[in-house]
Image (tube, helix red, strand yellow):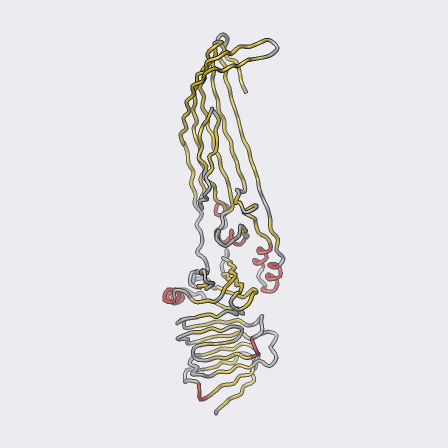
Amino acid sequence: MSYILHVPPIVSLGLDFSATVKLEFSLVLDSKAIREAVEEGNPLKALNSFAFRDTFDGVDRPLITFEAGVIPSVSTNALVVETGAGGGITFSIEIDWYDPYPETSGGIIRPFELLALGTSPLDWFNIRVCKMRSLLGLSLCETHSYFLPSCQWQTNLNLFCYVKVGVFVTVPLWGRVHLTLYELRATYTQVIMTLYYEPQPFLPLAQKSSSGQLSLSAWDQSNNMTCASKGGSVGNEELQCWEKDSSTPIIQTFSGVRSLQTGDRRRLLRDLQAGSGSLLLECIQSDYDHGSDPTLELNYGPCQINNSLLIITRTSITGVGRTTFSSLTSGSVTLPSPPQDGLVTTVGNSCDAQWTLTGDTSIEIKGREVNNGCKVRRVALLILHADKK
């Protein structure tokens, strides 16, 4: 947009506006999560049924790109010399999903992960940092290849001036004719405002090592947490862990799990004693090292116990998988429902803890092998066999 303010010499006022918006959006659907939500009676799990794609053809692209600017300028020319000056304000902002697990997400972000960050939409996005520069009177966005987990909106002041030597005339029926022989131009850019916001990432519920060992010690011990098997086999299992009672629960899925442990056992024991939360393991097939934690909760309700034999000893319990411990005082086991045919529970080999079994099973107690602290409490109707040999 240009206006002639004075002739002769010709004095012109130019006013340039620019604004562009680009949106790249993609959804991924998965009906498996709907089935899990129904089976577990947890409607929140239905959010697993779709996800937002953060990468396209392996390239991480922003969800929204917005650029805008306004540049006024004044120029004057006297046939062979033209001079001009101008300035303006430009800004660029690139909004993208905040990925809590960029190393393992595969470019897929699920709604429950965003809800775990917070209920404010500001907690769900990051913004790619753009540096603005002025060149030939135009504002260009110099985009860097890295992402920051933060929001930064940068506004710049751009100034320029120039001197041109050539022929600048107005020809009837043709309009203005420009023939530039020499040009001298200077530009200046100054940041005049920066808005900064950083989402608060949540701590992971568990961490998996490169060897496939899952460490369970990082979750908020004021909440109850469940870790359940979702498929795979021993040494290559898929597990899902989630907070049960939080209004904005964290839900994480881990694949390729070979074994589990409590991680920092002293820290976990201290936090569990200070908080009111508990850890429930459901149908875990992989070996689990429970360490020195005094209590253990296992849920075998949705699955079948291997060989219809549950074995309880002083240092381990073997059912769907094998769990070891060093100083257990009490343990609880929910048995398969509906009842598993022919299920037998054997208690022996220096058992020294109190156990609560919920469900249907036959029990065989090896009386000469158990210690005085070993007790089995019946919650459901059980068939009891005592071996006094």
Residue 319 visible = yes
108 vs 179, nearest the viewer? 179
Residue at 46% in and 67% down:
260
Q: Residue at x 57, y 80 (%)?
A: 343
Q: Position of residue 342 (x, y in %)?
A: 60, 81
Pick out the residue farthest to the front.
181
Q: Residue furthest top?
A: 8
Q: Quadrant of the N terminus?
A: top right
Q: Residue 265, located in which quarter of the rendered image?
A: bottom left
Number of marks in the rendered image:
0
Q: Is residue 206 visible?
A: no
For the point 44% across and 67% down, the residue is 261
Q: Residue furthest bottom?
A: 389
Residue 16 percent across, percent down from the top left: 52, 24
**Residue 305: horizontal and vertical position, in percent?**
56, 75
Instruction: Classify residue 303 by image quadrant.
Output: bottom right
- Percent of width and height locating residue 295: 43, 72
Would you place residue 215 above or below residue 192 in this image? below
Say if 302 sits above or below 164 in the image. Answer: below
